[in-house]
Image (cartoon, rainbow, N blue to C red):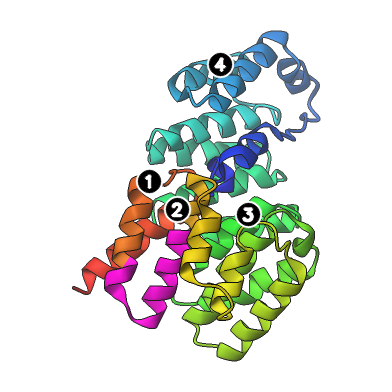
């Protein structure tokens, strides 16, 4: 959501932050540090503050956990990752990257750390760096749906949308269609095909999406709309159930307008997303990037 990683999807991403898989170092000394009950206590309190979006208090607790460990054990990687996530939410991106770099140095097998660092790069509109990290997250964990959607969004900010379409289509084929993020991934892939001007691939994916997605759930109506079988009003009516869905709808429709040449409509919709969207969503940062694109050409 905007960003899976940084709670780039409201409820789902909060649970993501709790799916921590830090491993203990083989060193007995480091194991002792990692198992220190005070380390565990401060780390868990930090995670609780992070979930409640009290980022400054989260940083204070992660600071204590890191001091106790000395920042040496593999287990401490999750404290650096948590603190880096909190810094990112406070828009202190340099500090966020420093901590996430350290988390990866301590534990390069954890896909969540790569996903979170990729999200920081996405927030700072460095899509190629973001894509590298999302790719690594998916190598480590092919089922990481947050990295898959984040990567799909990042590719729309590059000059190689077709590569993004191929990558996300492959992820869907290898099990992604069974994910609750399948609709989100499919829509971003349709938009990537549209950006690449591959009408045949777009039509094929729209048809496949109609057959595989739950017709009772968002964003099924958007797929129908792009096939000419639902009006824009019907799309927005379905999305009215939540502000998150509504900002998604406006972002997706705005991207479609951009690729059809209607930059004014794109700008209007993206400004709506920036005003009403959540900073933890992929769409919020896509809106920021495309507002810059449109205004740079005016």
| Disc 1 to disc 3: CB gap under 8 Å | no
Q: Main secondary structure of the magenta part?
A: helix
Question: Does the CB distance between marks 4 and 1 fall below 8 Å?
Answer: no
Taking the magenta stretch, the answer to whether it contains residue 154 is no
Give neighbour class at mark 4: few <14, some 14-19, many 20+ (Cα, 10 Å): few
Q: Residue at x 42, y 54 (%)?
A: 285
- Which residue position holds label 1? 276
x and y percent of residue 195 in the render? 47, 79
Asked if 283 appears above or below 244 in the picture, the reply is below
- Label 3: few (<14), some or many (≥20) within 10 Å? many
Residues under labels 1 and 3: Cα distance?
24 Å
Residue carrying label 4: 67
Instruction: Give SS at disc 2.
Output: helix
Give the residue at mark 3. 147
Asked if residue 2 shows in the view, the reply is no
Q: Camera-side residue: 175 or 70?
A: 175
245 relative position to 298: left or right? right
Q: Which residue appears at 56% of the width and 89% of the height?
A: 199
Instruction: Check if mark 4's residue and mark 2's residue have beta carbons within 8 Å.
Output: no
In this orientation, which residue lies closer to the viewer: 101 or 259? 259
Q: Is residue 271 left or right of residue 116?
A: left
Mark 3 and mark 2 lie on one chain; the one further toward the N terminus is 3
All told, the count of numbered labels is 4
Closer mark to the observer between disc 1 and disc 3? 1
Q: Nearer the viewer, mark 4 or mark 3?
A: 3
Q: CA distance from mark 4 to mark 3?
A: 30 Å
Q: Which residue is mark 2?
A: 247
């Amino acid at each position: 959501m905007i960003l899976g990683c940084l709670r780039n999807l409201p409820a789902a991403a909060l649970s993501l932050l709790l799916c921590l898989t830090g491993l203990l170092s083989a060193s007995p000394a480091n194991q002792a540090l990692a198992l220190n009950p005070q380390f565990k206590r401060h780390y868990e309190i930090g995670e609780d503050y992070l979930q409640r979006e009290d980022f400054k208090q989260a940083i204070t607790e992660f600071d204590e956990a890191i001091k106790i460990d000395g920042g040496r054990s593999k287990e401490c990687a999750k404290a650096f990752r948590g603190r880096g996530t909190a810094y990112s939410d406070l828009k202190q991106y340099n500090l966020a990257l420093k901590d996430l770099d350290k988390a990866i140095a301590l534990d390069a097998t954890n896909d969540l750390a790569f996903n979170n660092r990729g999200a920081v790069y996405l927030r700072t509109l460095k899509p190629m760096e973001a894509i590298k990290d999302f790719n690594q997250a998916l190598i480590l964990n092919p089922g990481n749906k947050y990295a898959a959607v984040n990567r799909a969004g990042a590719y729309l900010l590059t000059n190689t949308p077709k590569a993004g379409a191929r990558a996300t289509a492959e992820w869907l084929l290898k099990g992604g269609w069974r994910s609750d993020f399948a609709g989100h991934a499919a829509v971003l892939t349709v938009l990537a095909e549209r950006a690449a001007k591959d009408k045949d691939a777009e039509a094929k994916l729209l048809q496949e999406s109609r057959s595989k997605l739950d017709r009772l759930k968002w964003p099924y109506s958007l797929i129908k709309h792009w096939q000419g079988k639902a009006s824009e009003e019907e799309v927005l009516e379905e999305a009215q159930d939540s502000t998150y869905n509504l900002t998604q709808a406006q972002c997706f429709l705005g991207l479609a307008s951009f690729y059809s040449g209607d930059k004014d409509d794109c700008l209007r919709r993206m400004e709506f997303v920036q005003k009403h969207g959540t900073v933890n969503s992929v769409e919020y940062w896509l809106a920021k990037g495309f507002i810059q694109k449109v205004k740079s050409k005016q």
